[in-house]
Amino acid sequence: MSLLELKDLHVALEDGTEIVKGVDLAVDTDQVHAVMGPNGSGKSTLAYALMGHPSYEITQGQIFFDGDDVTEVGADQRAQRGLFLAFQYPHAVPGVTVTSFLRSAINAIRKAKAGGEDDPIPVKEFRTELLAAMDRLKVPRELASRYLNEGFSGGEKKRVEILQMAMLKPRIAVLDETDSGLDIDALRIVARGVQDLVGPEMGALVITHYQRILDHIEPDFVHVFVGGRIVEEGGPELAKELEAKGYEAYAEVEA
Ligand code: ADP
Ligand code: MG
């Protein structure tokens, strides 16, 4: 069994509209999966449902993480188990600095791992890791003491999402359109930041509309996602094919 498995996953909005209509997907460490689809196909809905967002209801099917059924498990517990989502639209958290947010998130995960006992990361270790990760991802030092995402540019938000990922060391990272709003240099830095972490400890699910981020993060598997369903699957060549021919061919199948 893969680390993350979705089985016939259906997701509905609060008003009952079904957006994700039966997705089967298996993602393991040391793998990069790309989910590519047009706007409005339900990619973010899929990502939110994976993370356990309360506004997105799983109406059918299951999510397994490390062999356990986590379909009904809350977002905090999914994070503690090692699932991470980099948001398409990161929210500002006024009053909470990037540093204190990261420290709290790391300590929550450490506490869960220690069976509920507090096990805070030593201050020096935290600081050393944070500075190294910030340098690697070219996140300006001054951002560390600012309120999370408040007044950040689009590119800064995305870099700070990847900084969170680097610090939290998830086992599966879900990246929802991390490429949107990034210029080419920022895209390269962010993509390298992800690529560096993919390995025996981590796998990634890269959700994207365009194939350009995949020039920097080579996917092992590509899943074409249209109308809430995976309509085609293949290797990296499929991403390039899609870039050339677009999603129209699939849109007809949907209707
Ligand atoms: P994508 O990420 O592929 O662009 P989304 O998952 O964001 O697609 O959206 C899929 C559909 O679900 C769209 O029609 C969108 O308007 C709708 N939708 C998603 N989330 C919500 C929400 N919280 N409230 C209302 N409609 C939503
Ligand atoms: Mg989206």
Image: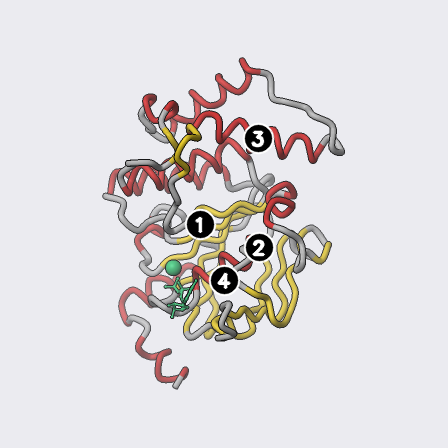
| Cα separation between marks 2 and 4 | 10 Å
Q: Which label belongs to residue 46?
A: 4
Camera sees residue 161: yes
| Cα separation between marks 3 and 1 | 19 Å
Camera sees residue 230: no
> Residue 172 location in percent, x, y?
56, 47
The residue that disc 1 covers is 175
Q: Secondary structure at mark 3?
A: helix
Q: Check the image and report above or below for 190 versus 179.
A: above
Q: Earlier in the sequence, mark 2 or mark 1?
A: 2
Amino acid at circle 2: Gly
Q: Check the image and report above or below for 16 versus 74.
A: below
| Cα separation between marks 2 and 3 | 19 Å
Amino acid at circle 3: Ile
Task: Judge: label 1 CB < 8 Å from ligand 2.
Answer: no
Q: Which label belongs to residue 106?
A: 3
Within-10-Å neighbours for mark 3: few <14, some 14–19, many 20+: many
